[in-house]
Amino acid sequence: MMDSTGRFLLSLVTAATFLQVRSTVTVIGLYGETIEVPCNNGAAKPEDLIFTKWKYKMDDGTSGDLLVKQAHKEQAQIQAMDGYKDRVTIAANSSLMIQGGSLVDQRTFTCMVVYGSNLDEHPVDVLVHKKPLPPQIKDKAKELENGKLTSLGVCTAEDANPAAAIMWSKNGKLLVADGKTIIITPSVKMDPSTGLSTTTSGLQYTAVKSDVGAKFTCTAKHSLETQVSAPETFIIHYPTEKLSLQVLAKAPIREGDNVTLKCNADGNPPPTSFYFSIKGQKVTVKDSDTFTLTAVTRNSTGDYKCSLVDDDKMEASEKVVVSYLDLSLSPTGKVLKMVRDTLLVKMEQDASGDAKVSWTKDNRKLDETPRFDNVTYADAGFYVCEVSVAGIKRSQSFQLVVEGTPVIKKMTEHHSEDGRHKVLTCEAEGVPRPSVQWSINGTNEENSYINGKATHKITVVPTGNLTITCIATNKLGNHFMALNVSSLIKDEKIPGKGAQDDSSDQALLIVLIVVGLIIAAALVGLFYWLCIMKSRRGTWKTGEKEAGTSEESKKLEECKAKV
């Protein structure tokens, strides 16, 4: 039995004078989201709208009602009795809203609009799309063998509609199947419960040595989004083609160092055992690619080799050079020489290469090897010989001490700046440092001692012409020198006083002459008396006359002659 609305619609459709069916429009909805199906492409409602009705094409091809919305009523009347009953509503613009879109919604929906004496139908085909889950590479190979076709892995893009397309890439470059070295096997499988499709793609790949570290990815291409899998790298196995021998040591290698030899093979996986040729002797090293030479010497210099245990014809070699330097210096330590002696310096060196030799004296660089054919005081000092070669340095040294008795080189005099004094200078050479003494007292003493040379100065005020002596003394001896120093007092400087001084000098001279004559006479008398006493010694003993004998007279005459 038909309700009032149904009877009204039926009568209206029967009485209608014009029916128009519009062309079909396609709408794509998203899986799991609300699908909006527009009525008349979203055009405005006619002013004389009576009602709007939505219906759909059922699986058996017949039409099923969903809902009716009368123009003068707020609420639509839901007519659907199947799964759409709780999922459909009508929007203000007359669009059909389908909640929780799924693949069952991929069908034709028709919007029927009745207005005035017209009835329009607007069919809409609904498609539901779903992007796949992110692609993954599964069933990955543990390793790839050089030159061998191997199953690398399977890429999956699950639960998509429509099904995704899968492509393989290496280092971002698309891999194209050639049926020989690259084989790609795609397939699509649909889930009967959801209708969603899972795409798989298997890759068989022939690896080469250059694929070490290569990044393989698969891309799932879909209408909604293109997604790329996480990159995968694979171990590539390939045989050893080349060996190299590496010397692990800090350069330059010196005697006493430890030197490690490392044999590098370009195969993967690398060999685990090697032969090392050490000075012609073959040594087997297992589970290691190194061999260490401990405390090398200059005799360790030479060629070293390594080779494969299973193929000793494949070998590598490297030369090891041990740097060394021997230095011998004569003399060394403290060397004592007298001035003007000869000292022979002898340096010998034995090095692994061209050695650089340098000399310093008291930390100052010398241009050449020191020679001492005639040692001087200036030669005294600390000498260092340094020899270097390839990062090795050796040095030896000697301390030259030069000694000698003092020798006064010169004595000088000059007036002071005010002209009232004279400055006497005595310069003497000698080691150890000589002490200087003067035969006259002075003031303002100054002294210095540089490179075996002592300089001593005093200030004097000579009132007359004097002969002054300088004496230089050290433990080895002494030396003296005299200097005539003129008086500072002159006639022209003190008028009227010269005559008085001359008279005084003459008087003094006369007194000295007289005293000298008196002393001489006394000495002559004493000598004469002694002589007489000796000649008369016998007379006193015998009691002879005082006149004496002729012999005594003769002796007396001899005494007179001596006097």
Image (tube, grey):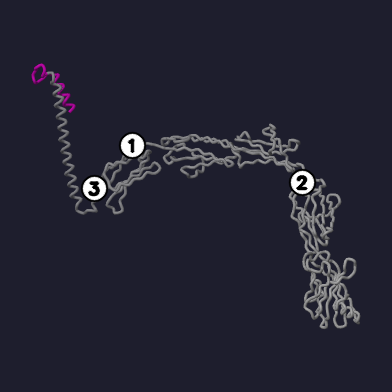
State the SS at label 1.
Answer: strand
Q: Which quadrant would the C terminus be assigned to in this image?
A: top left
Magenta segment:
539-563
Residue for badge 1: 478
Residue for badge 2: 143
Decide whether residue 550 is among the magenta residues: yes
Residue 390 appears left or right of 171: left
Q: Amino acid at mark 3?
A: Thr
The single residue placed furthest to the top in the displayed view is: 542
State the SS at label 3.
Answer: loop
1 vs 3, front mark: 1
Depicted 547 relative to depicted 83: above or below: above
Depicted 7 relative to depicted 467: above or below: below
Q: Amino acid at mark 1?
A: Asn
Measure the alpha-carbon separation of dots 1 and 3.
Answer: 29 Å
How far from the left and from the top, in percent, is residue 486? 27, 47
Residue 463 bears which disc, if any? 3
